[in-house]
Amino acid sequence: MLALMALRQTLTLIDHSDSFTLKLQMETMQELPGLIVSVLAFIALYYLKETIMEHNQSLASKYKLESRLAGIVNNAFDAIITVDKSQRIVTFNKGAERIFGYDEDEIIGEKQEVLIPPRFVEKHRKYIDEFPIHPDKSRQMKVASSKIFARRKNGEEFPIEANISMTTIANETYFTAILRDITKQTKAEEDLEHMAFYDTLTALPNRLFFQKILHQRIASLNDSFAVLSIGLDHFKAINETLGYPAGDMALKAVAHRLQLFVDDQQHISRLGGDIFAILLPSQKKSENYTSLAEKIIDTFALPISIAGNAINIELSIGIAIYPLHGKDANSLTVCAETAMQFAKSTHQHFSTFAPEMQKDSLDHLQLVGELRHAIKQNQLVLHY
C-alpha cells in the first residue's frame, strides 16, 4: 500500500501527443527505501515504454488509413478535385488527369477556371460565392448536384455530372468536386430523343414533336399564328408505278424543298404518310397566310427527279388559324388537315378552314359507314 501511495505521489506522466515527460519528485523519493525506489522506477519505465509503443501503433494505423484513403481517392474512376477559397487547385486525382488531360504537377496551384468553358466562368464564380456557410459549426459541408460543361486541356468542351461539397478545416475553406464525364450518356439520351421526335425517312420532326411545339406556342403567345397541312396529290400513283423506294425518294425530295422555304421562325414536320405541316408565325392579315401557301405551291412548279424520271409533284394545302379555328394543338391540326382534304377534293391548291368543311367531312364519313352497312346487310337494290 505504501508503494502504491508513493507511486501516485512521485510519478506524473504527461502526454504531449508525440513526446512524454517523466517527472520524479525527488524529495519524496528520498524518503523511501532504495528497493522501493528501484521498483517504482522499473514500473515507471515499463509503463512509459508501453505507452510509447501504443502511441506509435496509433500513429502507424492513422498513417496507414490515410494512405488507404489517398489510394482510393487517387484511383477513383471519377475526377476528384479540391480547390481552396481563392479557387486554386490543391488536389487533382488520376481520374481528373484522365478526364481533363492535365498532369497533376502542371495543374496544382492553377485557377480552376482553366477547367471551365469561358461562358460558364462567371456563373460558376457566382455559385461559389453564394455557397452557404454555417459559422456555428467547426466543420461545414453543403452538397449540390447539377449537370454542367467542363473543358479539357485541348479545349474540347464536354458534359459532366458534378457533386460539389464545401468543407472548413482549421478555419480554412475548401471546395471538393466529384466530376463524371457523361458524354456517352448524353449522346445516348440525345439519340433516344431523336428517335422519339424525328422522322427516320426525312429527318424532319414528327407529329409528336409538332404537337409539342404547338403546345409551347399556345402557352407562350397571345398572338395568332397558322398551321399549314400539306398533302401530296396522287402520291399513291408514284408508289404503284415506280415502287415504294421511289415513293420514299419523293418524300425526301419534298421534305428538302420545303426546308428551303421555311426560316428560323417557322417549324416544319412530317406528320405521317404523305402529310407535312408548317407552323407559321403571326401575320398582320390572314390573307398573308394564303400568300405564303401560294409561295409553297410555286416552289414545286419545277419537277423532281426520281429514279431517272422527272415527276411533277402537286400539293394541296389546308390553313387553320389560332385561335379562330382552334384553341388547342389537336383541334388546330385537325382543322388544317380537314381544310387540306377539302382543297384536294375540290381540286384547289389551298383552302382556309371553315366550319362547314368539318360538317361535310362528318357527313361523308357517315355516308361511307351507312353504305358499308348496307352492303353487309344486302340492302342495296339495282334499279334499271
Image (cartoon, grey):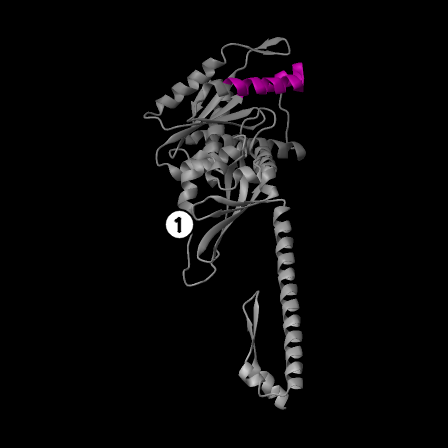
Up-down: is 219 above or below 354? below
In which quadrant will I find the C terminus? top right
x, y percentage for residue 119? 43, 35
Residue placed most toward the observer, 166 or 12: 12
Q: Is residue 121 visible?
A: yes
Image-quadrant location for residue 38: bottom right
Q: Amino acid at mark 1?
A: Glu
Residue behind mark 1: 130
* Residue 176 shown left or right of residue 37 in the figure: left
- Coordinates of residue 306 in the picture (x, y in percent): 61, 12
Based on the picture, tell me whether residue 250 belongs to the magenta stretch.
Answer: yes
Q: Nearer the viewer, residue 127 or 217?
A: 127
What kind of element bears circle 1? loop
Tell me if residue 136 comes above or below residue 100 in the rendering: below
Total marks drawn?
1
Q: Which residues are magenta?
A: 232-257
